Image (tube, helix red, strand yellow):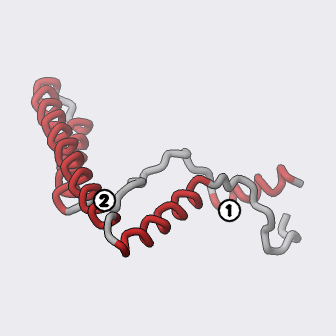
Amino acid sequence: MATKITQVAKETLGVTTGMICEHKESWWWNKDVQDKIKDKQESFRELIRSTDEAKRVGLRDAYRKAKKEAKKVVVEAKNTAYKRMYERLETKEGEHHMFKIANARERKRQYLEAVKFIKGRMDEC
């Protein structure tokens, strides 16, 4: 029965590669970070699409430069965001916010692997 359920689920839903393409901590992102990341991604796409070896050298240098700039902007954005967060946590209402952060981290830490109940009909198997 388990193999049948797995087979139907694969046919219905499909199979993913398992790669996560999301930014995990994006609360500190700002417009500068988004622009630099888009520039970096575009320069990488141009590098991948290029077939001329002489042109690839210049594109590789442009990609490395965009990557360094993106890293710098990310570090600056993170530092300013964390600095603002810590200043806010030192206030009285920040104490309440600190408990919210602790609860969110606890929920994120919990391991959810097994599905306990699936609602639906079984006559399609």
Left or right, residue 99 beside residue 41: right
Q: Position of residue 17 (x, y in %)?
A: 54, 45
Q: Quadrant of the C terminus?
A: bottom right
Up-down relation of residue 18 to residue 91 (above or below):
above
What residue lies at 30% left-to-right and 59% top-to-bottom?
A: 86
Q: Position of residue 61 (x, y in %)?
A: 13, 30
Residue type at mark 1: give it. Thr
Between residue 88 and residue 61, name the one nearer to us. 88
Cα separation between marks 1 and 2: 47 Å
Up-down relation of residue 97 to residue 50 (above or below):
below
What residue lies at 23% left-to-right and 48% top-to-bottom?
A: 74
Left or right, residue 70 beside residue 101: left
Question: Which is closer to the viewer, label 1 or label 2?
Answer: 2
The residue at which mark 1 appears reads as 12
Between residue 56 and residue 41, name the one nearer to us. 41
Marks 1 and 2, the one that precedes in the sequence? 1
Residue type at mark 2: give it. Tyr
What residue lies at 10% left-to-right and 30% top-to-bottom?
A: 58
Q: Are marks 1 and 2 in contact (CB under 8 Å)?
A: no
Residue 70's quadrant in the figure?
top left
The residue at which mark 2 appears reads as 86
Between residue 102 and residue 57, name the one nearer to us. 102
Residue 53's quadrant in the figure?
top left
